[in-house]
Image (tube, helix red, strand yellow):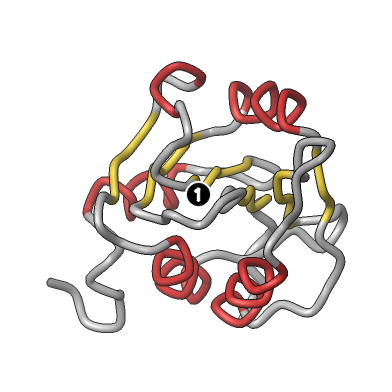
Amino acid sequence: MLKGISPVVSPDLLKTLAEMGHGDEIVISDAHFPGHTFNPRTLRADGIGADRLLAGIIPLFELDAYATPVVMMAAVPGDTLDPAVEAKYRKALGYDGTIERMERFAFYERAKKAYAVVVSGETAKYGNIILKKGVTPVA
């Protein structure tokens, strides 16, 4: 256990976050997301909601200031999104900026190029989110 780091951030996730560079992306997916199909660097966080993971990650992770740093999956035509999912993710991140919505198969393609995927225990429909890493400001 390390002081100041949420216990939902596993050693493997901490290492992954540290390895990422500016512009790299990480997918925090719902429990149904086929992470292992799309990305060889897939971590598991079974039983942990995506909002808890986001809240644990964001103190360690600077969001990109030069591009839209948050992307979520759009609903399939004919389906609907639960606005509470976005609201709880925004709250966990402390983020009130733009969130890009991406069509399901385009989201899958982007997940293939992401630095890593973390499959959470999130059960909310369309509970998938991508974070783009920024540059840590100089103190």
Q: Is residue 44 above or below residue 129?
A: above
Amino acid type, callout 1: Ile
As drawn, 16 above or below 66:
above
Residue bearing the label numbered 1? 28
Quadrant in the picture for residue 40: top left
Viewer-side residue, 55 vs 126: 126
- In percent of width and height, residue 111 lies at 61, 30
- The quadrant the C terminus occupies is bottom right
Q: Nearer the viewer, residue 43 or 128?
A: 128
Name the residue located 63 percent from the left edge and 48 percent from the top edge. Answer: 130
Give the image quarter of residue 37: top left
Vertical position of residue 87 compared to residue 106: above or below: below
- Which residue is rendered at x = 68% and y = 68% of the image? 86
Locate the N terminus by quadrant: bottom left
Residue lying at 84% horizontally and 36% vertically, measured from the top left: 77
Q: Is residue 94 left or right of residue 123?
A: right
- The residue located at (60%, 70%) in the rendering is 89
Question: What percent of the width, then of the height, locates residue 78?
Answer: 82, 40
Residue 94: percent from left, percent from top: 64, 82
Q: Is residue 40 shown left or right of residue 102?
A: left
Percent position of residue 113, x then y: 63, 24
**Image: 59 above or below 61:** below
Nearer to us in this view, 74 or 136: 74
96 to the left or right of 85: right
Residue lying furthest front in this view? Answer: 78
Q: Secondary structure at mark 1?
A: strand
